[in-house]
Structures are given as structure tokens and as C-alpha cells.
Amino acid sequence: MKAARRGAGGPADVKLDIVTIFPSMVKGPIAEGIVGRAIERGLLDVRVHDLRDFTTDRHRVVDDVPFGGGPGMVLKAEPLFAAVEHIRAARGTPSVVILTSPDGERLTDAVTRRLSGLEHIVVLCGRYEGVDERVRASLATETLSIGDYVLSGGELAALVIVDAVARFVPGVVGDEQSVARDTFARGLLDYPQYTRPAEFRGMSVPAVLLSGHHAEIEKWRRREALRRTLERRPELLNGVVLDAADKELLKDLTRERPERSGSE
Ligand code: SAH
């Protein structure tokens, strides 16, 4: 569905608040590229909050030692609660409060689509050994991980979330067709792309792409998207609706594939 834009001059389509101890780590990247342009055009309203502004002590301490002992420090609950309360007072109750964490729900295409339909998203960036569990229990409404590896902080995860979500906000990516064709959008990986020159160091662009024959080009692209998915991420094919033509293409592709198991 093509959601009605609240339009130029009106309130932004999506409000985002990011809470971090390293605001400049977040502010630089969001000022660039597609996200930067969406902010300039008022489609996204992103605010970055310094967690230390929500401390009450002279030294602006945001962390403390873990109860029960063990290495490292833990982000305290109080400043995070205070930050979200400030955001609520200034901008209204957020639709979601996301805690970034490697043990969270995995960020996927479906999750970023869901988030892009919300009005107001708060992202909390953890640091050190993590965040006091009471934040997860009664401040965050969900916990998201950007993959099975551990980062030293939630800032890069927050940037990934903002970038991926922004792409689905209507008007953010100039050509909505391009989002609809991206990898995962149709359940398949994207087809290969080429640009000029047509011949480069002995490598030429597939002739069909130069033919101007749109139906043939579409067919080639669908076939290559199916091929890539079959070769690299076959499990994705279980989640795709395939028409008769697709099934025919897949049958050909499977036949073309060199035997990989046990034959050598
Ligand atoms: N001790 C924790 C890791 C803390 S890493 C554990 O083993 O689970 C410090 C912070 O980085 C986390 O609080 C979280 O905000 C962020 N972070 C690290 N890896 C992440 C990931 N894969 N996805 C999202 N956030 C992550």
C-alpha cells in the first residue's frame, strides 16, 4: 500500500529518537545520503540524545559495577528511564522503545517494514557489558539484534535500524520501484546490475540487457534472481510465491547446476 504522505511542511512521517553516550557517533552518519536527505526534506525527524544529560550527579555517571561481581560495567537504569520520560514529554508516547542487544529478535526485512509503519521509534544504545535488566523488563517494548556477533555498543545497530527502516518510509527512496525490487523485497535476492561501459577489461554485459526488449529483460532478471537465491540462499525459496513461469525457470536452473554432492 502506498501510504498517504503527511506531506511537505507537515509533521514528519516518522519520528526517531536515539539515546546514546556517543551522540557524535550517530549524528555524522545520519546526516549523509538517503537518510540525510529524508531528514532535510522533513520525512524523518531524528533526534539524538546524550544519555549523560539525564544523569543527576556532578560527574554525569551512566554506568556502575554489576551486582554479584564480574568484569566490566553496566549501563544504569535511571538515566535511560529519565531519557525516555523526557522524550515522551517532548514528543508524545513513542510507538516502540527498542533496546539494542545481541540477544534480541533478529532484525529482518519484515521487522524493518513493520517499524517503518510506526509514527515514533525510540532506540536505546547499550554499552559496556550491557544494560541493567530492568530497562528491558519495563522500559523497552522490544529488543533487537542486528546479527549474531557482539558490537561494543548499540550505536552502529541503531544506525542500521534507522537506515533500513527509512528506506521503507514513502518518499525517502526517490524511486519506490527500487525498494520494491531490492533483495528480500520479493523474497528473492536481487538480480545482477551493470552500468556503462558495456565492455570492460574483456568482460561484457549480458546482451539481453542491451537489447531494449523489456519482456526479455524482465524474464532474464527474474531468472537471475531465482538463480542467485537458489545458489546462495536456497532456504528463502520456501517463503516465496512462485508462478508457473518461475517454477519452469527453477527447474531449468536446477538441471543446469553442477552436481555438488558425492560425485567427485
Ligand atoms: N555482554 C553483552 C554484550 C554487550 S555489548 C552480551 O554478551 O550479550 C554492548 C552493547 O552493544 C549492547 O548493550 C547492545 O546495545 C550493543 N550490541 C552489541 N551487539 C549487538 C548486536 N548484535 N545487535 C544489537 N546491539 C548490539
Image (tube, rainbow, N blue to C red):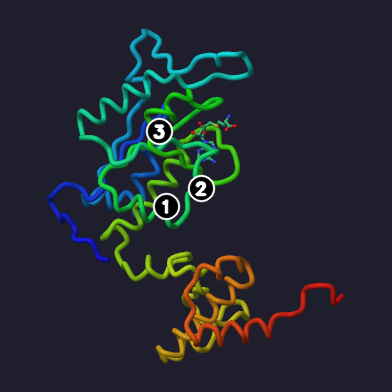
Q: Which residue is mark 3?
A: 124
- Whether label 2 lies within 8 Å of ligand 1 gets the answer no
SS for dot 1 = helix
> Residue 89: x and y, percent?
20, 28
- Whether label 1 lies within 8 Å of ligand 1 gets the answer no
Q: Amino acid at mark 1?
A: Val
Q: Amino acid at mark 3?
A: Leu
45 to the left or right of 101: left
* Mark sitting on residue 111: 1
User: Taking 110 as reference, is 26 above or below it?
Assistant: above
What whole-number distance in Å separates the C-alpha atoms at marks 2 and 3?
Answer: 16 Å
Q: Residue furthest left?
A: 9
> Residue 235: x and y, percent?
60, 66
User: Taking 187 as reference, is 205 above or below it?
Assistant: below
User: Taking 181 as reference, is 26 above or below it?
Assistant: above
Viewport quadrant of the C terminus:
bottom right
Q: Residue at x 56, y 37 (%)?
A: 151
Q: Earlier in the sequence, mark 2 or mark 3?
A: 2
Viewport quadrant of the N terminus:
bottom left
SS for dot 2 = strand
Q: Residues within 10 Å of mark 1 (few under 14, many from 20)?
A: some
**Which mark lies nearer to you, 1 or 3?**
1
Q: Residue furthest right?
A: 264
* Mark sitting on residue 106: 2
